[in-house]
């Protein structure tokens, strides 16, 4: 089953070339990441530490595209960093990737390899249809690992019919976070203007395959939203 996301007309008007990709991995088994899989992650971390410096990150064309996207939203990307850049900066600073669980760790691995921000959601906690839209002034967002945030109308969010799942492409909500009880994982590969569709698709596919390797389950057909 393809998971569709409606891109609101106001978002389309400002960003007509914005694209996303979604894919579902069903029947996963969420647990602590095994030592063998952590070693695989560490190998990628070491490669990226050798490839980038703190100063060179901002010059990467993919990172640059997301930063430009943020500036067009009047969001300072040095204060609210796109998720993939935030992970890469951790690596370059020697902090590595945080180990949360096998599903989230698989996603973070795919994100730093492709530099595309990836959203992960417990699909059984999604209520109604999904929409990518501008936030309403005063809306409240419940981030994973942080205080509740009051949003402004220049921020783009992914929401269902009841709640906000994601500040785009920055942070996911505690309401649909991946836990040990999660069985069905919705992956959203977050594009931006100037990011090739092929790379957005690659990031979604890579994430789904890593999740399957790390946590089992079966992968459904990818959907492209544009």
Image: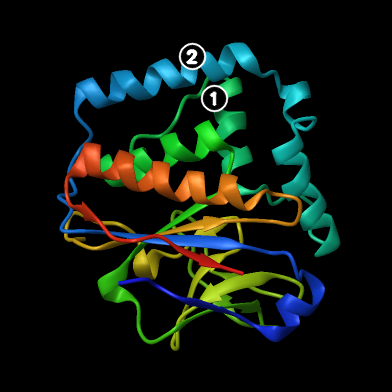
The quarter of the picture where residue 155 lies is bottom right
| Secondary structure under the numbered disc 1 in the rendered image | helix
| Secondary structure under the numbered disc 2 in the rendered image | helix
Disc ID at residue 109:
none
Q: Quadrant of the C terminus?
A: bottom right
Q: Nearer the viewer, residue 180 or 146?
A: 180
Percent coordinates x, y for residue 167 in the rendering: 58, 65
**Residue drawn at 60 percent across, 57 percent down:** 169
Report the side of 209 relative to 199 (left or right): left
Q: How many marks?
A: 2
Give the alpha-carbon distance from disc 1 to disc 2, as whole Å.
8 Å
Q: Nearer the viewer, residue 118 or 55?
A: 118
Percent coordinates x, y for residue 130 in the rendering: 47, 79
Report the side of 158 relative to 17 (left or right): left
Marks 1 and 2, the one that precedes in the sequence: 2
Q: Give the answer, above or below, for where 24 lies relative to 110.
A: below
Give the number of the mark in front: 1 or 2.
2
**Residue drawn at 26 percent across, 40 percent down:** 102
Q: Residues within 10 Å of mark 1 (few under 14, many from 20)?
A: many
**Residue drawn at 23 percent across, 37 percent down:** 213
Percent coordinates x, y for residue 208 in the rendering: 34, 48
Q: Which residue is mark 2?
A: 46
Q: Give the answer, above or below, for where 146 lies relative to 158.
A: above
Q: Give the answer, above or below, for where 162 lies relative to 72.
A: below
Label 1–label 2 contact, CB within 8 A: no
The quarter of the picture where residue 87 lies is top right
Q: Which residue is mark 1?
A: 91
């Amino acid at each position: 089953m393809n998971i569709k996301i409606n891109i609101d007309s106001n978002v389309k008007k400002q960003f007509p070339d914005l694209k996303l990709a979604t894919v579902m991995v069903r029947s996963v088994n969420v647990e602590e990441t095994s030592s063998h899989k952590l070693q695989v992650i560490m190998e990628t971390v070491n490669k990226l530490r050798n490839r980038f410096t703190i100063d060179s990150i901002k010059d990467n064309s993919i990172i640059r595209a997301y930063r430009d996207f943020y500036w067009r939203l009047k969001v300072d990307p040095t204060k609210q960093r796109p998720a993939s850049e935030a992970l890469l900066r951790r690596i370059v600073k020697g902090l590595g990737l945080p180990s949360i669980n096998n599903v989230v760790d698989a996603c973070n691995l795919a994100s730093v390899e492709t530099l595309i921000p990836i959203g992960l959601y417990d699909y059984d906690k999604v209520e109604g249809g999904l929409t990518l839209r501008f936030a309403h002034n005063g809306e409240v967002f419940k981030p994973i690992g942080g205080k509740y945030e009051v949003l402004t109308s220049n921020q783009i969010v992914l929401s269902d019919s009841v709640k906000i799942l994601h500040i785009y492409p920055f942070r996911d909500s505690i309401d649909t976070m991946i836990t040990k009880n999660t069985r069905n994982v919705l992956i959203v590969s977050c594009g931006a203007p100037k990011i090739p569709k092929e790379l957005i698709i690659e990031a979604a596919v890579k994430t789904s395959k890593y999740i399957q390797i790390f946590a089992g389950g079966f992968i459904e057909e990818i959907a492209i939203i544009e």
